[in-house]
Image (cartoon, rainbow, N blue to C red):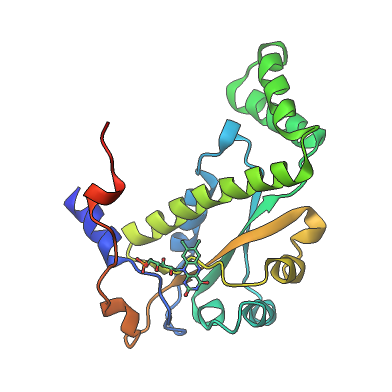
Amino acid sequence: MEEYLNNLTWRYATKKFDAQQKLSSTETDMLEEALRLSPSSFGFQLWKFYRVDDPAIRTAVKDAGYGQTQLTDASHLYALASKFAPTEQDVVDFIESIKTARGVTDESLAGYKKALESAVIGKPAGDIAAWTAKQVYIALGFLLDAAAQHKIDACPMEGFDSVKVSEIIGATKEGYTVQVLCPVGYRATDDKYAAEKKVRYPKERIIKII
Ligand SMILES: Cc1cc2nc3c(=O)[nH]c(=O)nc-3n(C[C@H](O)[C@H](O)[C@H](O)COP(=O)(O)O)c2cc1C
């Protein structure tokens, strides 16, 4: 338990990455599994996680991210995106995946299917998009935690033009909006932010036992 908390203290939003130090494929596989294993409402997974390896696309993302150097210098860059207009087909796909994973029948899932439909069909578009966007932040938490526990640096980032980045990486045409970016890799030895003291309210202020 102590090591777990030490790692959470060790991590920080890395401002300057060492551009020479790359993650191994074993490490990126682990981070991607953490994303895949993240829970979502109904388990619906109305999201897509893009890994942006193409240097030219990363440069374009940096330009749409106010020039923040993490976007090009970090070993790898993930863009976490949510589906903005889920359809009946998403319900059908998900029901099929439950049947495959658990060997259950359509009949046994009829009630669940109705609940899924009522969550995503016939509601105001803005409400649905806001709901799917929230799910992505759970995956972000899993990614940040998985990285920290393996002494991999990361920086959650909302400081970018989401419309532009979604276009640049091809998410928009696939029906997704990028909510948050997360470069991962290793901190530069001269990133002065690494030595900054953590700023967190004391437990008494944020945890209320009733
Ligand atoms: C959703 C989210 C968006 C953020 N966006 C940026 C960003 O665009 N650029 C940046 O340098 N840091 C960004 N941060 C980092 C926060 O400023 C940082 O996590 C916070 O100050 C707490 O510090 P720590 O993560 O170093 O403990 C973001 C953090 C979160 C959770």
- Nearer to us in this view, 67 or 205: 205
The count of marks equals 0
Residue 22 position within the rendered picture, expressed as x and y whole percent measured from the top left: 45, 76
185 up-or-down from 30: above or below: below
Residue 187 position within the rendered picture, expressed as x and y whole percent measured from the top left: 37, 78
Q: Quadrant of residue 30?
A: bottom left
Residue 3 position within the rendered picture, expressed as x and y whole percent measured from the top left: 20, 55
Which quadrant does the C terminus fall into? Answer: top left
The structure residue drawn at horizontal position 56% and vertical position 77%, both measured from the top left corner, is 71
In the picture, measured across the screen, residue 115 lies left or right of residue 122, that is left
Does the image show residue 105?
A: no
Q: Quadrant of residue 64?
A: bottom right
Q: Quadrant of residue 95?
A: top right
The structure residue drawn at horizontal position 35% and vertical position 61%, both measured from the top left corner, is 148
The structure residue drawn at horizontal position 30% and vertical position 77%, both measured from the top left corner, is 194
In the picture as drawn, the residue positioned furthest to the left comes out as 2
Residue 89 position within the rendered picture, expressed as x and y whole percent measured from the top left: 80, 35
Ligand 1 located in image quadrant = bottom left
140 up-or-down from 123: above or below: below
In the picture as drawn, the residue positioned furthest to the top comes out as 107
- Nearer to us in this view, 83 or 201: 201
86 up-or-down from 3: above or below: above
Does the image show residue 18?
A: yes
In the picture as drawn, the residue positioned furthest to the bottom comes out as 190
